Image (spheres, helix red, strand yellow):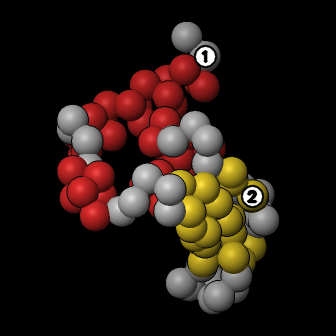
Amino acid sequence: MTGHFRLADLVRVALAEDVGSGDWTTQWTVPAEKHAQGEVVAKAAGVVAGLDAAVETFRQVDAELRIELLCANGDAVSVGDTVLRVNGSARGF
């Protein structure tokens, strides 16, 4: 197994534990046609890590989400720097 497959498996297991059979609150309260944009913003100065896991998590939750990486793993960030943006169905994130 390559690292990519192990990450996908880890994300699948984590989502199954956290979300189980689905996020019923979102299904009941967020209209299917509602689109949204979200950002991951640095709350402290540091070094970006874990983008592969973040992208894989969004992919498994909703493969139609569009993810724009604005940094790479290893990049230094300051408070307020945007690391990534996500666009798509509001139910996907």
How crowded pointer 1 is (Cα within 10 Å; few <14, some 14-19, many 20+) is rated as few
Q: Is residue 78 left or right of residue 11?
A: right
Q: Quadrant of residue 1?
A: top right
Q: Compute the Cα span from label 2 to label 1.
A: 25 Å
Q: Which one is nearer the viewer's eye here, 45 or 88?
A: 88
Q: Which one is nearer the viewer's eye here, 68 or 8?
A: 68
The local secondary structure at tag 1 comes to loop
Determine which residue is flagged by label 2.
68
As drawn, the residue found furthest toward the top would be 1
How crowded pointer 2 is (Cα within 10 Å; few <14, some 14-19, many 20+) is rated as few
Q: Quadrant of residue 80?
A: bottom right
The amino acid marked with disc number 2 is Glu
Is 23 located above or below residue 38 in the figure? above
Q: Is residue 25 left or right of residue 85?
A: left
Identify the mark at residue 2; answer none if there is no mark.
Answer: 1
Upstream in the sequence, badge 2 or badge 1? 1
Rendering coords of residue 44 (x, y %): 56, 85
Identify the mark at residue 33; answer none if there is no mark.
Answer: none
Q: Which one is nearer the viewer's eye here, 26 or 20?
A: 26
Is 30 located above or below residue 51 in the figure? below
Rendering coords of residue 67 (x, y %): 69, 53
